[in-house]
Image (spheres, helix red, strand yellow):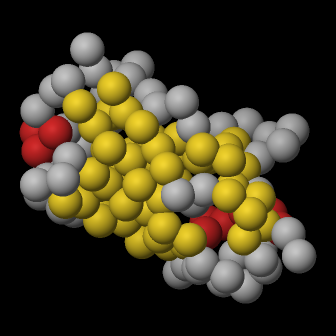
Amino acid sequence: QVQLVESGGGLVQPGGSLRLSCVGSGFTFSAAAISWYRQGPGKERELVATINTLGEITYSSDSVAGRVAITRDNNENTVYLYLDSLKQEDTAMYYCRRFGTEDWGQGIQVTVSS
């Protein structure tokens, strides 16, 4: 059974940083590209970034340009999303997804507020 589990969210102050984790199981993790999405209140879900099997990264969101990074550790079956200089507009549910499939994590809430 394929599972993707996000962690690392919570309440963060503006200007702070966060690291989200996405742990995958039930499939060959190293052979999967993984994407991070987010959905803010009242907004559509947007693609933030994707890391492929070679570790190559495609950043897709102008709203986080220059503030985001994504890495993977295949030994830990984990993809990390780093976001810094956080703004209130970064408040959202963050999801990871196995690229090219409908395998999604349950999402993790990030709230940026003072």
The percent position of residue 1, horizontal first and vertical second, equals 26, 14
The percent position of residue 21, horizontal first and vertical second, equals 41, 55
The percent position of residue 52, horizontal first and vertical second, equals 22, 51
Q: Is residue 79 left or right of residue 5?
A: left
Q: Quadrant of the C terminus?
A: bottom right
The percent position of residue 109, horizontal first and vertical second, equals 68, 47
Q: Residue at x 67, y 82 (%)?
A: 16
Q: Is residue 100 left or right of residue 42?
A: left
Can residue 60 be seen here?
Answer: no
User: Which of the 4 image quarters holds residue 99?
Assistant: top left
Q: How many marks?
A: 0
Out of 65 and 106, give the one closest to the viewer: 106
Q: Is residue 55 left or right of residue 42?
A: left
Task: Name above or below for residue 81 compared with residue 3.
Answer: below
Q: Residue at x 57, y 37 (%)?
A: 107
Q: Residue at x 33, y 26 (%)?
A: 3
Q: Residue at x 24, y 60 (%)?
A: 72
Can residue 74 be seen here?
Answer: yes
Out of 65 and 13, give the one closest to the viewer: 13
- Give the residue at the far top of this rendering: 1
